[in-house]
Image (cartoon, rainbow, N blue to C red):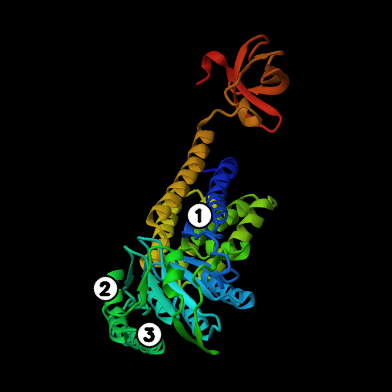
């Protein structure tokens, strides 16, 4: 296929595909940033005031909502909430928890901050239907007070996919055993510090057991069950807790709940830490590079692609990605670019699509399910890629099949009239212009219809129309 035709076809589809790829992450991010923490089951900022003369009228309890995956953004958010509660002189900090788990490093940051906090901390698995799974169990055990709402559960704290080989080799199994034993020692330490059940905590890590709020209370995994944040404040009032500064008695009855939502930076980091967003950004980077290389000097695709690539790498830096997956995606990019430069009739595109899909599937395959890229998203992006290159290739084929209407090639086969005798040279009138011409097969008198059979620079070779083939 003619390379220039292919390039024109690529340019024709670039704007449409770029708009589709840009719309996906922008809409997703806008939705996440716009909703903020409203979806976190926020508590009322101003509950009913305490009775007149009550000593709790001026007291406040700060609230943060740790909802979703525990990662760098949520760790930063909780640590800022602890600092804010300390500077506010809050009676306590409530962490409303609903998480499937998260990264060990971020969990460690939160747990250590809870243990070192001068402000009493209360982890509250809320609202109904919420869970404190995996890393959420460690956070719950690290708090001064652990509470759950009705119809909630916690557990399943076994480390997931910590071995490079997926746990199949002896070395992998040794690594898994090391990490598991370390996690057991850590959570048993939390249990001893907070006076909770260490044996169940070890089972949660080693056997991934889970329990409901009723079982958790009976096994002394948590301290109480509360129907609402206000009921929680009433239930913990007068409870004595141990902080690094010494023992403190909670005076929370009638205290004012003050929400401390995520700021714009934390929300942005939360969106960026989603592996699906990182994948979309990586795809945008691929297309930006393709468009820039196929249309040098366009600038805009290159700028967008470079920015998307940096953000994608920042997103993937949050979690451990598979090197083989990254290499396959890079190989797919090379094949896509080669298919624009080399006429392969779609073979290179097919190979690039296969490498793109397999690389995307491998990219986060060692992570827990909630940290993997959505298969639906992978197939959608692959379908968009296939549609784009099918459009580009199809447009190029259709362009080649069309009759040429301009240039010297358009004169081939054209019908004209001799203006002078061709014996064998003379002049003919073709396509609205007078041309010098010569007869291919003998003399032709003036006024005869002829057909152009060859173009030699500005000179035509013709033959009589009735003899033309």
Q: Earlier in the sequence, mark 3 or mark 2?
A: 3
Residue 423 percent coordinates (x, y): 67, 18
Residue at image coords 45%, 51% = 381
Say if mark 1 contacts mark 2, CB within 8 Å. Answer: no
Furthest residue toward front: 53
Q: Nearer the viewer, residue 371 or 256?
A: 256
Q: Earlier in the sequence, mark 1 or mark 2?
A: 2
Q: Is residue 294 left or right of residue 161?
A: right
Residue 308 percent coordinates (x, y): 59, 59
Give the residue number, with chain letter if any, for mark 3: 187
Q: Name the front one of labels 3 and 2.
A: 2
Q: Name the front one of labels 3 and 1.
A: 3
Q: Secondary structure at mark 1?
A: helix
Q: Is residue 287 above or below residue 87?
A: above
Asked where in the image residue 302 lies, by quadrant, the reply is bottom right
Mark 1 → mark 2, Cα distance in angstroms: 56 Å
Q: Is residue 295 left or right of residue 274?
A: right
Q: Nearer the viewer, residue 426 or 391?
A: 391
Asked where in the image residue 142 lies, by quadrant, the reply is bottom left
Residue 144 percent coordinates (x, y): 45, 81
Figure label count = 3
Mark 3 → mark 1, Cα distance in angstroms: 49 Å
Res 157 visible = yes
Q: Residues within 10 Å of mark 1 (few under 14, many from 20)?
A: many
Q: Secondary structure at mark 2?
A: helix
Q: Which mark is residue 215?
A: 2
Give the residue number, with chain letter if any, for mark 1: 336
Q: Nearer the viewer, residue 309 or 152?
A: 152
Q: Secondary structure at mark 3?
A: helix
Residue 62 percent coordinates (x, y): 55, 70
Residue at image coords 56%, 76% = 82
Q: Is residue 288 above or below residue 112?
A: above
């Amino acid at each position: 296929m003619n390379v220039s035709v292919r390039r024109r076809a690529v340019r024709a589809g670039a704007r449409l595909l770029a708009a589709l790829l840009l719309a996906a992450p922008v809409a997703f991010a806008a939705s996440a940033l716009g909703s903020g923490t409203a979806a976190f089951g926020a508590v009322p900022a101003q509950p009913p005031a305490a009775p007149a003369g009550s000593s709790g009228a001026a007291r406040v309890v700060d609230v943060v909502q740790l909802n979703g995956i525990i990662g760098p953004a949520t760790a930063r958010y909780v640590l800022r909430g602890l600092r804010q509660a300390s500077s506010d002189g809050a009676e306590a900090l409530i962490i409303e928890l609903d998480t499937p788990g998260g990264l060990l490093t971020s969990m460690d940051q939160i747990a250590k901050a809870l243990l070192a906090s001068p402000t009493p901390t209360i982890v509250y698995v809320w609202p109904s239907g919420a869970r404190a799974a995996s890393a959420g169990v460690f956070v719950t055990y690290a708090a001064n007070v652990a509470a759950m709402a009705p119809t909630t559960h916690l557990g399943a704290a076994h480390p997931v996919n910590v071995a490079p080989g997926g746990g199949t080799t002896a070395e992998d199994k040794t690594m898994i055993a090391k990490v598991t034993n370390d996690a057991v020692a850590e959570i048993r330490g939390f249990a001893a510090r907070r006076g909770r059940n260490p044996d169940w905590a070890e089972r949660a890590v080693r056997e991934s057991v889970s329990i409901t709020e009723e079982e958790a209370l009976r096994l002394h995994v948590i301290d109480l069950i509360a129907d609402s944040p206000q009921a929680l404040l009433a239930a913990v009032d007068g409870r004595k807790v141990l902080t690094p500064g010494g023992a403190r008695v909670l005076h929370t009855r009638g205290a004012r709940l003050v929400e401390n939502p995520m700021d714009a930076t934390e929300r942005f980091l939360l969106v960026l830490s989603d592996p699906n967003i990182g994948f979309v950004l990586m795809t945008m980077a691929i297309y930006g590079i393709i468009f820039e290389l196929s249309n040098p000097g366009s600038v805009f695709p290159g700028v967008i692609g470079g920015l998307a690539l940096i953000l994608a790498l920042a997103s993937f830096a949050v979690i451990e990605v598979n090197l083989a997956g990254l290499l396959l995606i890079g190989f797919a990019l090379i094949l896509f670019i080669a298919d624009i430069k080399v006429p392969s009739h779609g073979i290179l595109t097919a190979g690039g699509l296969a490498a793109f899909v397999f690389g995307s599937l491998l990219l986060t395959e060692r992570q827990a399910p909630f940290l993997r890229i959505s298969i639906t998203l992978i197939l959608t992006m692959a379908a968009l890629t296939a549609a784009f290159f099918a459009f580009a290739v199809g447009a190029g084929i259709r362009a080649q099949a069309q009759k040429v209407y301009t240039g010297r090639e358009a004169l081939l086969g054209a019908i004209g009239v001799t203006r002078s005798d061709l014996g064998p040279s003379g002049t003919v009138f073709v396509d609205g212009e007078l041309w010098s011409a010569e007869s291919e097969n003998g003399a032709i008198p003036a006024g005869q219809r002829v057909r152009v059979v060859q173009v030699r620079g500005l000179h035509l070779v013709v033959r009589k129309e009735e003899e033309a083939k």
